[in-house]
Image: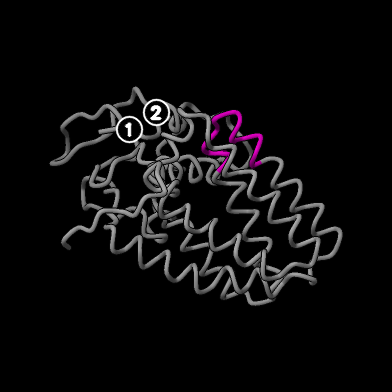
Amino acid sequence: MPLGTTAALGGTVMDATARSALAPLSRTLNLRESVTEKLRTAIITGELAEGEVVSAPVLGAALGVSATPVREAMMDLAREGLVETVKNKGFRVTAVTDKELDDITEIRLLIEPPTVARVVGSVPEQGFSELQRLADECLAAAKAEDLNGYLAKDREFHALILAYSENRQLAELATSLRRRTRMYGLQALVRENKLADSAREHHELLELMRAGDAEASRVLMDRHIGHARGLWARGTDEEPPHRSE
């Protein structure tokens, strides 16, 4: 298990001595969102393992906050499908099969690349300035080995591009699917100093969009999403093994 665990409450709960993604938080005005982002990253990257049962008080102790914002954050994550409530125990990290990841990727490929191609020519200069800022911050987070910052800025970057489709339902669905994608291979990319290579694809995409090349933008988004199923999910772009459901 990626984090130290102790047997408790009929399952396993994370030890208060947490690492990396669950280092103590600095208190901010938006504490609930900060806690949610930390826990989301821990789940997406496998720091909190599938099937692990965690409690708000123990997680709060690890993050240096009270149980209340943790409980609120976990309810938000339950609505995203990342955890499920366990009566009288806390929350269990949901498992995602290879088939489910394949299905999520298939839907994203149907939605995001053609939408990106469609908005080429519709992004104003101010929009490009904001996208450039997010791409720069995502790259900086990758170089700093800050997975929390990397995932947050990556999500903001793509959500902003999709917002120019003027289809709110589409943008929200794509963002929701992105949140549900597990990316256990990111830890390996950090160890191998390769995460920045993936982050640079944001800059490449902006160059293509600025140039008005809709088809090349679509092709790049196809490849970018493919990383979420290959390189980011497992640390390799090889085809995933087929498992029986």
> Which residue: 23% across, 52% down?
86
| SS at badge 1 | helix
Q: Magenta residues, as a range?
A: 138-150
Residue 111 part of the magenta-drawn span:
no
Q: Amino acid at mark 2?
A: Ala
Cβ atoms under marks 1 and 2 closer than 8 Å = yes
**Which numbered circle lies on residue 62?**
2
Q: Is residue 88 left or right of residue 182?
A: left
Across and down, in percent, residue 212 comes to 79, 67
Q: Looking at the image, which is closer to me, 171 or 77? A: 171
Q: Residue at x 53, y 73 (%)?
A: 111
C-alpha span from label 1 to label 2: 6 Å
**What is the magenta segment's predominant secondary structure?**
helix
Write down the quadrant of residue 103 in the picture: bottom left
Which residue is more in the foreground, 53 or 107? Answer: 107
Residue at horizontal 59 percent and vertical 37 percent from the top: 196
Residue 58 - label: 1
Q: Is residue 237 above or below residue 222?
A: above
Where's the N terminus, which quadrant?
A: top left
Residue in the image at 55% along x and 68% along y:
172
Crowd tier of the residue under label 2, counting other residues whose Cα lies within 10 Å: few below 14, some 14–19, many 20 or above: many
Q: Label 1 sits on what residue type? A: Val
- Image coordinates of residue 157 in percent, x first then y, are 65, 54
Q: Residue 226, image x and y in percent?
A: 47, 57
Name the outermost residue toward the left.
Answer: 10
Q: Nearer the viewer, residue 208 or 118?
A: 208
